[in-house]
Amino acid sequence: MSQADNALTFQYRLSVLSRFCAAILGGYFFTAYSISLLSLLLPTSKVDAVLYSVCLSILIYSCVFIAVFSVRSLIHIWAALVVSIGAIALLIGYIQGGS
Amino acid sequence: MKDSFFRSMTWLHTWVGLLMCWLLFLIFFAGTISFFRHEISLWNQPAVHSIENNKVQQSALIDAGLEYLGKTAPDANRWWIGLPSPRQPEVQVSHRHSQPDGQRDKWIDERLDPNTLNQVDGLVDTRGGNFFYRLHFDLHYMDRKLARWLVCLASLFMLIALISGIVIHKRIFKDMFQFRPQKGVRAWLDAHNLSSVLALPFHLMITYTGLVTLIFMLFPDPANTLYEDGVKGFRADFYPERQRTEATEQQLSTPAFNSAFEHFRLNWPEQKIKRVIVDHPSNMSATIKIYGDNGTLIRDEHPYWQYSGTTGELLKTARLDPSSGEVLYGGMIAVHSGRLAHPGLRWLYFICGIAGCIMIASGCIMWAKRIRERLKPEQSPSFGLKLVEALNLGTIMGLPLATAGFFYANRLLPADIADRAEKEILAFFIVWLASAIAAGIRRNKRVWQGFAYLNAITWLLLPICNALTTNGNLMTYIVEGKWILASFDLAFLATAAAFALQGKKLSSKVNAVKVKPAQKRTLNREQKA
């Protein structure tokens, strides 16, 4: 194996690791924030709002997971995750501050 | 774009599948067995085998239970009366006692024969089906919280593997009816597809709802957002029945248990009861908690009535009319646990679970076979490949053997040995460890075949061991109409037959048809890692 090959596989492995991190951790936090927002928006009783949101969580999580692995550019993925999580967190803060 | 999506999903399917497949096999295997959790607890407790099906009215059983507990455990801080069901013939009468210096309260379990109302003698200390039930999400010898997080991660990977598997499986219906044995990896691929596709709705359902059962550990965020004290506050709201009642200084001289039950029977005459709990039975704060039986309803939590033990008045009720959120959440947990299933549906659950085990096992085997096929003759297999092969053999063949070991231990260990329940579990893990070590040393076709035959003989002898160590055997079970116990013997024999068949198959495969190069190419294209 040449040096270039080694470098390539190392870079490739790093990108795979990054993608798994984006899917598992990014997906987790995206889901956590978005279902928190959902629970705030649902016009039901508090218990029902919590139950509906947690039941949907796995659906959201798996969709994000699949999406992370279907988009080619890693930078796009991380950017999209960070921006959307930030936006949702801001929205949650706004709603909670307003009420 | 479409092609690259397809390829990334193929890659994803292979890797998320492989990374967690042994843990997933354990979860699926133990989970499938725990569909028969109460039946295994029954099998493991020969003293209750002779109990006839209950014909006594529930009210008489509750009275007898209260009377028994009043006599044997007046100073307990909790009584528990579990009423018989078709899956559990005996009345469970348990009592819990406070321990000094902050130790955990101690439960003492006893059983009554519902027909004679006498205490059942000769109970052995065993975890029964609860061992497998706990094993499938708490694992064992491990911190519970860490184990549950691992199980969650594995389940998530399972769900991702299922979704990506559907995407890459273009010809889903055509392949469903395709099985080409004797064709090397092809046969494994077909077995993998068949077991996945046939039971696909089950696999998706059980994985999704399995994650939902641990959801408040995984995602406490909505509860944290809406409640000031987070999940704790949510639980107080959602589970009013779990609120503790504290004991007072005063002793209760004349309990009003009877008037409480009279009120209940008058107002809900049709309601079947699952269990009755009495908190602080001989204290002024005595509380009676009645849990209704859900029967075959798709509900998880039981309807609930709470009475005062001192005055007999109704203090509160819960879940008599569940909200839509509870119907969704409780429904998901109910279809996961399958407590609602009558015997036919229960067997369907079990068969689908077995299909899941086959799906996972064939997936891992196929992965190792592919890599090995691609090796050039002069190449020696990498450590990774050896590890995968050893884990495959140790898990797929070792777990069934360990399960048989657990059943043998239950019958053969002396009844009065200390920590008997733990020793049964130890037997399970020793057999599994031994299998794993054997797999670590050698794992060629001959060893697979040896394991298959070993499993076959072990499972075949289990009904004989049962007949020699208990008063019943397959013939008496059938004559007396004890179908649960008869099914155990039949299931043991069927398992033995399946392993014998597998062993035979492995010996004929030595001169199996080699995959032709052309086939191999399409194969690689279809499922390329």
Image (cartoon, coloured by chain):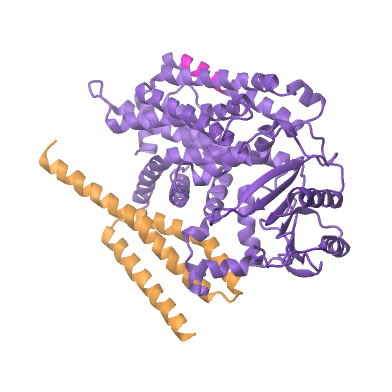
Chain colours: A orange, B purple
In the image, residue B173 lies at what x, y percent?
54, 40
Depicted A91 relative to depicted B410: above or below: below
Q: Which residue is rendered at x = 70% and y = 45% of the image?
A: B341
Depicted A11 relative to depicted B25: above or below: below
Residue furthest out toward the left: A3
In the image, residue B345 lies at what x, y percent?
69, 42
Count of labels shown? 0
B501 within the magenta span: yes
Residue B247 visible to an observer of this rendering:
yes
Q: Nearer the viewer, residue B195 or B54?
A: B54
Query: Which quadrant: the C terminus of chain B?
Result: top left
Which region is colored magenta?
A: B499-508
- Please identify the dominant SS of the magenta region: helix
In the image, residue B22 lies at what x, y percent?
43, 37
Q: Is residue B265 left or right of residue B441?
A: right
Residue B397 visible to an observer of this rendering:
no
Q: Which residue is rendered at x = 42% and y = 31% of the image?
A: B392
B123 within the magenta span: no
In the image, residue B480 lies at what x, y percent?
82, 27
Instruction: Name which quarter of the figure residue B325 lies in.
Output: bottom right
Q: Is residue B412 left or right of residue A9?
A: right
Q: Nearer the viewer, residue B357 or B470?
A: B470
Residue furthest out toward the bottom: A98
Q: Which residue is rendered at x = 23% and y = 48% of the image?
A: A12
